[in-house]
Image (spheres, grey):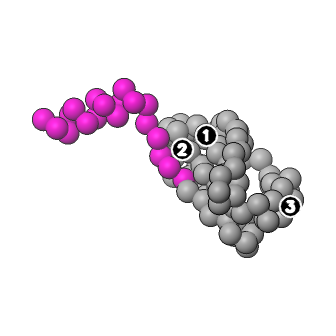
């Protein structure tokens, strides 16, 4: 399973965000992360991480990942989303099955 993590914060909160990131413990071995990729827009900084894990452990993995984002709850202006992703081919097959 693939989960996209998106964290957003204003540039004024960068120092606090970096400090928190450096203090974060690693996620369990069964969760593979790619990123943290960052870009800026008119609202501030946006961080992207792609998480991969076996769907058998989905509930546990999503809880672990969500808990890691909650470490930033008191950083002014911080928000996050966790978005489940699917391969385009798999999503198209599912759509065709449902459309029949």
For the residues carrying marks 1 and 3, which lies nearer the camera in this image? 3
Residue named by callout 1: 50
Q: Secondary structure at mark 3?
A: helix
Q: Is residue 8 visible?
A: no
**Could you give the CA–CA distance between mark 2 and mark 3, rounded to whole angstroms?**
26 Å
Residue 21 or 29: which is nearer the viewer? 21
* Pointer 1 with pointer 2, Cβ within 8 A: yes
State which tag comes first along the sequence, 1 or 3.
3
Q: Residue at x 61, y 41 (%)?
A: 51
- Which residue is pictured at 83% across the width and 64% down the height? 16
**Which residue appears at 54% of the width and 53% of the height?**
82
Give the structural element (helix, strand or loop) at label 2: strand
Compared with residue 93, is residue 19 higher up or lower down, i.e. above or below?
Answer: below
Q: Please give the residue where the numbered disc 2 appears in the rendered image.
A: 3
Instruction: From the image, tell me which residue sits under label 3.
Output: 15
Expressed as whole percent of the image width and height from the top left, the position of residue 11 reads 76, 60
């Amino acid at each position: 399973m693939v989960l996209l993590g998106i964290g957003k914060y204003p540039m004024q909160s960068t120092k606090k965000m970096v400090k928190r990131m450096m203090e974060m413990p690693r996620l369990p071995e069964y969760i593979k992360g790619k990123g943290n990729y960052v870009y800026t827009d008119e609202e501030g900084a946006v961080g992207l991480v792609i998480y991969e894990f076996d769907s058998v452990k989905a509930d546990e993995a999503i809880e672990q990942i969500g808990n890691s984002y909650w470490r930033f709850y008191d950083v002014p202006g911080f928000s996050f989303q966790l978005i489940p992703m699917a391969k385009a081919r798999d999503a198209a097959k599912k759509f065709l099955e449902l459309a029949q």
